[in-house]
């Protein structure tokens, strides 16, 4: 047992496990990169989030009895894979970034990458996208799933950074064309509207209480457009009124156009 080692706050209760000795080497390698403990899987770790490798890539198993289940990202199959192949420019995200057919592709920073669905939709709309995710385990799962399952024409347009986005934006030598923010929605408990994957993500990374500050950083970055995803009837993030918005049944995209850049 190696939990004497204090875990970084951002990865609390997370451990890398392996189920047979032949997987121990790769598990230890990942654990040391993520600064996490690594152990043979056993009931002793049932109360932790467990990062496990399987035949089809890495997955995150939620604590036993949490009712949360397993997080496994796949961009090639299922509804998401189908949606990525069908994405058209009239998609609300494309409209929010002012994309119309025939227009050049943009460089967009997704400053809250999470499970990568919105970022890959933006890449499927022909944009170059930098996914910035501050939680190291989520950034790792994203990298692994994109490498294994994302279609080649999407994969070649994306980059992943494990960083805090305010710092990332300040360190960039030039502003991107657009910045996208989708901070965690307020907790709606076990509502059927909250998908299981998002509940696991929230349990691991917590709420995003600093999202108003991140919007300020995005607005000061020099990007021409900042788009914030909100629940349809929520107030604008940080009380900052957008230039306009695009409303969908459950979601609103608040658009901030920077006229000075
Ligand atoms: C609601 S999720 C985003 C979901 C994502 N749009 C998708 O399509 O899967 C928010 C994510 O943003 C990350 N995040 C929040 N604030 C951040 C920041 N300042 N820098 C980097 N990542 C951040 C959180 O760790 C979380 O994974």
Image (cartoon, rainbow, N blue to C red):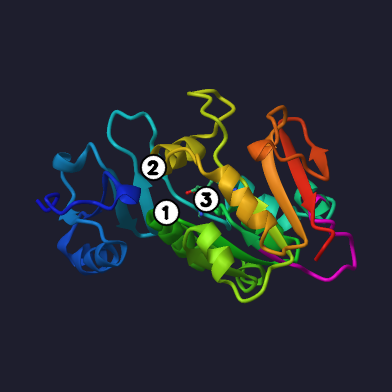
Q: Callout 1: helix, strand or loop?
A: loop
Q: Secondary structure at mark 3?
A: loop
Residue 202 position within the rendered picture, expressed as x and y whole percent measured from the top left = 45, 38
Specify the label residue 135 is tagged with. Answer: 1
What residue is disc 2 on? 204
Residue 231: x %, y % from top left: 67, 32
- As helix, strand or loop, the secondary structure at mark 2 comes to helix
Q: Residues within 10 Å of mark 1 (few under 14, many from 20)?
A: some
- Of residue 185 and residue 67, the one placed in the foreground of this image is 185
- Which circle's residue, 1 or 3, is located before the other in the chain? 3
Instruction: Say if mark 1 contacts mark 2, CB within 8 Å.
Output: yes
189 and 9: which one is in front? 9
Q: Residue at x 62, y 71 (%)?
A: 152
Locate residue 3, reporting x and y percent.
14, 49
Instruction: Tell me which segment is drawn in magenta.
Output: 96-108
Instruction: Give how far across and how far down residue 105 sits, in percent.
Output: 78, 69
Q: Viewer-nearest of labels 1 and 3?
A: 1
Please check the rendered image and state whether residue 102 is part of the magenta-colored stretch, yes or no: yes
Quarter of the rendering containing residue 33: bottom left
Magenta region, main secondary structure: loop
- Separation of disc 1 and disc 2 at Cα? 9 Å
Residue at the spot of label 3: 114
Whether 248 is drawn above or below 157: the answer is above
Within 8 Å of ligand 1, the CB of disc 3? yes
132 left or right, relative to 71: right
Q: Which mark is residue 125?
A: none
Which callout, 2 or 3, points at the residue further toward the start of the chain? 3
Q: Quick one: quadrant of the C terminus?
A: bottom right
Q: Picture quarter containing residue 127?
A: bottom right
Mark 1 residue CB less than 8 A from any atom of ligand 1: yes
């Amino acid at each position: 047992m190696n939990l004497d080692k204090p875990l970084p706050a951002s990865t609390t209760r997370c451990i890398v496990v392996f189920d047979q000795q032949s997987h121990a080497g790769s598990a230890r390698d990942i654990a040391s990169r993520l600064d996490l403990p690594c152990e043979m899987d056993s009931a002793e770790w049932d109360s932790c989030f467990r990062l496990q490798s399987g035949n089809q890539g890495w997955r995150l198993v939620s604590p036993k009895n949490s009712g949360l289940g397993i997080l496994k990202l796949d961009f090639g199959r299922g509804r998401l894979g189908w949606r990525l192949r069908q994405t058209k420019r009239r998609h609300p995200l494309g409209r929010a970034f002012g994309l119309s057919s025939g227009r050049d592709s943009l460089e967009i920073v997704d400053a809250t990458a999470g499970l990568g669905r919105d970022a890959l939709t933006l890449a499927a709309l022909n944009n170059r996208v930098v996914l910035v995710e501050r939680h190291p385990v989520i950034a790792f799962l994203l990298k692994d799933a994109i490498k294994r399952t994302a279609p080649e024409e999407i994969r070649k347009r994306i980059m992943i950074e494990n960083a805090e986005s305010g710092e990332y934006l300040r360190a960039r030598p030039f502003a991107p064309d657009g910045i996208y923010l989708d901070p965690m929605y307020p907790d709606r408990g076990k509502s059927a509207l909250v998908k299981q994957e998002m509940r696991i993500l929230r349990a691991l990374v917590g709420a995003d209480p600093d999202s108003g500050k991140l919007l300020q950083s995005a607005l000061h970055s020099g990007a021409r457009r900042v788009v914030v995803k909100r629940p349809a009837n929520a107030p604008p993030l940080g009380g900052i009124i957008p230039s306009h918005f695009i409303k969908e049944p459950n979601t609103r995209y608040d658009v901030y156009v920077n006229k000075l850049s």
